[in-house]
Structures are given as structure tokens and as C-alpha cells.
Image (tube, helix red, strand yellow):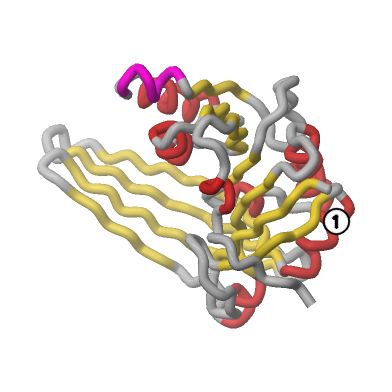
Amino acid sequence: MQKRSSSPACPIAMESRRAHILDLGCGTGRHAVELAAIGYNVCGIDLSADTLAQADARRITLPHDVAQRLRFQRGDARTVRTEETYDAVVSLFQVASYQTTNADFMAMCHTAATHLPRSGLFLFDCWYGPAMLADPPKVHVKRASNEEGAVIRIAEPTMRPHDNTVEVNYTITMTDWKTHALEVVVESHMMRYMFKPEVELMLDLSGFEVLDSATWMGGELSAVDSSATFIARKR
């Protein structure tokens, strides 16, 4: 039986405020900025050059003491090597769920292990399998507008239960009120939902022990939670 830690869901908050963190799949840097703002040194990694450009643009708007604790570089969570060691590795916004095969996810775990000393922490979230099966994703429409234009995003998911994946097809329609120009963008994302036993096994094979599994920001994980957060320590 897994022993639940009495510590907070994010134990890195108890580490030194000068600790170094590797952020795998940092996106536009939102989490990295928050971590830097409370004193951590953060290296953000992302595969998208456009996304990293947004992260750098965000960084230069920050106070100097925060900005100097941030750096971003391009890389794949499965293969990147910064030749540095960190106190913790984090990977948020379900980056782990983009690793749709066991080999991909274990490669990401190996990246984390490579950059951590013994007892270093690895924290990540993913789509949680029990909730996906109990309440499969449905078509979802999101609308937003302001004085400049409107955006409609339609998400159409297709479950692939033999692979534990969901193919989400997005249709995004953008309207410019001033020019009446209409732009339609179509994207497809394959996402994996994961279960505790497989996560624990692959972490164990990658040299980690699981400290806790919880809902985001803490709380008992249940079958209705669509997202699970795992905290592991390198052995």
C-alpha cells in the first residue's frame, strides 16, 4: 500500500528558495515565472520555437531580479540534456500525457532522472485514466469575444481505449470585427490517459520512488479527477 506523505502536494516549496528547477514543457513560461518570482532559478525547456519566443518576451517584462533567475531553451522532454543538475524537475499542463507510448514516457522519466541528484524530486501531472473511462471526454465548444473580434473553439475527442489515448481534434474560428476577416485553424492532439500502477512501474524502472499522488494542489485522488499529480523522488 502506498504511504501518503503528510507534506504538501508540492514538497519543493519546502526546499531552499535558491533551489534550481528544470521545467520540462514550459510552454510560454507561466509556471516558470511564478517559481522564479518566489526565488527559484528555473530553466524552461520546450519543443516549440514560437512558444519559447513568447516565454522570452514574457521574461523581459519582469523585474530584473526575477528575469535573471529564468532562462529558456529549445529541447524535447524525452531527449534534452542541459549538462546541469537540478534540485527538482517539474512538468505541468499534462506534458506527460503527450508522451503517448511507454517508450516516450520512460524517456521523459529518464530525462528527469539524468538531471537530478539522489533524493531529487520529480513532479508532473497527467490525464487520469479512471476519470476518462468513467466520464469520457465530450465535444466541447468555447467562445470568447471582445471589441476586436471573436474566437470559437470546438474540441471533438475520439477515445482510443486499446492505446489509452484520446485524439482531440480542434477547430478554431477567429473573426476580426474591423475587417470581417475570418480565419479557421484545424489542429489535432493525441493525449494519453494514465493509471497509477503503470505510472508507478515506469517511475520505478526509471530509478524513482513515488512519494504521493494527488489532485492538483493537493487532495485525495479519486476516480472523478480528470488530472492526477505525481511526486517522485530519485533513489
Give me the residue at 69% from left, 36% from top. 77
Give me the residue at 73% from left, 39% from top. 112
Q: Which residue is mark 1?
A: 204
Give me the residue at 78% from left, 46% from top. 234
For the question of whether residue 63 can be seen, the reply is yes
Q: Position of residue 206 (x, y in %)?
A: 85, 48
In the rendered image, residue 66 lying in the magenta stretch gets the answer yes
Q: Position of residue 124 (x, y in %)?
A: 62, 51
For the question of whether residue 28 can be seen, the reply is no
How many numbered markers are drawn?
1
Residue 28's place in the image compared with 233, above or below, is: above
Q: What's the magenta region? A: 63-68
Name the amino acid type tagged 1: Asp
Image quarter of residue 229: bottom right
Side of 43 where 121 appears, left or right? right
Give me the residue at 37% from left, 43% from top. 184
For the N terminus, the image quarter is bottom right
What secondary structure is the stretch in magenta mostly built from?
helix
Residue 204's place in the image compared with 47, above or below, is: below
